[in-house]
Image (cartoon, helix red, strand yellow):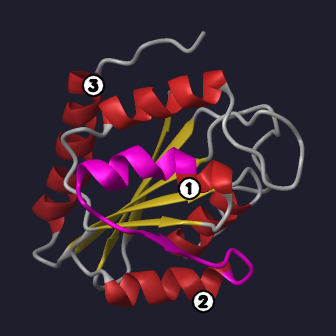
Amino acid sequence: MIKRFNGFLFLIVLFSAVPLTSVAQTDEPITTFILVRHAEKVDDSADPELSPEGKERVALLTEMLAEVSFDAVYSTPLIRTRETARPIAEERNLEILDYNPRNLEQTANRFKEEHPGETILISGHSNTTPMFANALLGREHFTGSFDESDYGNLLIITVTESGDTKLIHLRF
């Protein structure tokens, strides 16, 4: 069973620690990227749906991010990543936009250019999420993939217009 997370505490961390420390240092627009790996899947087939435990994790993620005002939601075009992002997108009347995880550096640069000052959710995979985070950060923070059995990483990355970046790595 997935442990419940205090959504109020998460919002304090998200809105106090990330934007306010950045705003105190600069007047530049701050873009916030929230990256998650898809939730647990039913099997190891090529494009599986989420398992009951995965659906429970998605409900927890949706509750944790209930007060976050997203401007865009991105996912790879697979069922498990789309199902992870779907409730958040639907609650905000946003379309889930596909991204190709094959060239993450180029995609990260495009997202930074297209979404200055916005908050973006990105649903990916155990191998793409840490590498996408590295591309957004402009440095190697993660040295490899998340463990295949690990679904509980939540990465919050802020990027200023001048390229200053910060990372908060949470577990849920």
Q: Residues within 10 Å of mark 2 (few under 14, many from 20)?
A: few
Of the two numbered discs 2 and 1 in the rendering, the one whose residue sits closer to the viewer:
1
Mark pair 2, 1: CA separation: 21 Å
In the image shown, does 71 or 56 lie closer to the viewer? 56
**Amino acid of disc 1:** Arg
- Residue 149 position, x and y percent, is 79, 31
**Residue drawn at x 70%, y 43% as measured from the top left:** 49
In the image shown, does 43 or 32 lie closer to the viewer? 43
Report which residue position mark 2 lands on: 106
Residue 47 is drawn in which quadrant?
A: bottom right
Mark pair 1, 3: CA separation: 22 Å
Query: In this rendering, is residue 4 above or below 154?
Result: above
Residue 152 is drawn in which quadrant?
A: top right
Mark 1: secondary structure: helix
Q: Residues within 10 Å of mark 3 (few under 14, many from 20)?
A: some
Please report the bounds of the magenta region as a residue range: 83-103
Residue 93 on the magenta segment: yes
* Marking on residue 32: none
Q: Is residue 131 left or right of residue 99?
A: right
- Residue 61 position, x and y percent, is 42, 34
Q: Which label's residue is closer to the chain start, 3 or 2?
A: 3
Q: Is residue 19 left or right of residue 85?
A: left
Mark 2: secondary structure: helix
**Amino acid of disc 2:** Gln
Report which residue position mark 1 lands on: 82
**Residue drawn at x 68%, y 61% as measured from the top left:** 78
- Residue 151 position, x and y percent, is 66, 35
- Residue 79 position, x and y percent, is 66, 54
**Amino acid of disc 3:** Gly
Figure quadrant of the N terminus = top right
Residue 46 on the magenta segment: no
Report which residue position mark 3 lands on: 7
